Image (cartoon, rainbow, N blue to C red):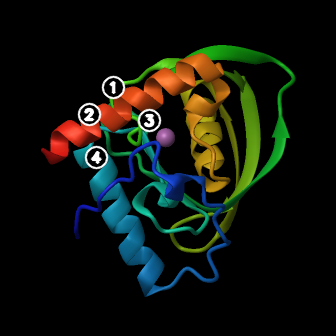
Amino acid sequence: MALLPILCYPDPKLHTVAKPVPSVDARIKTLISNMLETMYDAKGIGLAATQVNVHERLIVIDVSESRQEALVLINPQLLWCSEQTHMNEEGCLSVPGIYDGVLRHDAIKIRAQDAQGQLREIEADGLLAVCIQHEMDHLLGKVFVEYLSPLKRNRIKSKMLKSQREARD
Ligand code: NI
């Protein structure tokens, strides 16, 4: 297993639209292990392949307290979402230190393959529903700060670029 470098906003590679995972083979299984290790090490609750610069439709999530309930979503498709939405404070491993409110559907239903390639349907609400919506956005090249006002987003962009410069110096 290995820790993978996480792309940081505003890296343009984060706006790449991911392609479907062609088959759940040894390569994908290694990627899943590495992404899980990277997510747990960074103390995140979700990580999309896009964030580790692999542009395929793969997500790992763990919203449990125990950090032992990994959920792997391959080629996820949204089947249904509730009309009801709510504002939730979100953060992202690609935008460290920034938290802000994003409107998300309360409940969703998706279809995805699991780590063995089995097709499953998953109904989610609460934090899991928010996390799945956030991670599925990454696969479409969308980072949560893009829901914020241009003013806020530009402020975040400058802050990120400044801290990235400082980290290099
Ligand atoms: Ni994120």
Tell me the quarter of the image containing the C terminus. top left
Q: Are marks 2 and 1 in contact (CB under 8 Å)?
A: yes
Q: Nearer the viewer, residue 9 or 18?
A: 9
Q: Amino acid at mark 2?
A: Ser
Q: Residues within 10 Å of mark 2 (few under 14, many from 20)?
A: few
Q: Residues within 10 Å of mark 4 (few under 14, many from 20)?
A: some
Q: In the rendered image, which residue does mark 3 sit on?
A: 92
Q: Which mark is residue 97?
A: 1
Q: Which numbered disc covers residue 40? A: 4
The reply to whether dot 2 and dot 4 touch (C-beta < 8 Å) is: no
Q: Quadrant of the N terminus?
A: bottom left
- Mark 2 and 3 residues: CB-CB less than 8 Å, in contact? no
Q: Is residue 114 visible?
A: yes
Task: Kindly state the secondary structure of the residue where label 3 is placed.
Answer: loop
Residue 88, image x, y percentages = 58, 17
Return the disc, 1 or 3, that comes first in the chain's sequence: 3
Residue 119: x, y in percent? Answer: 69, 67
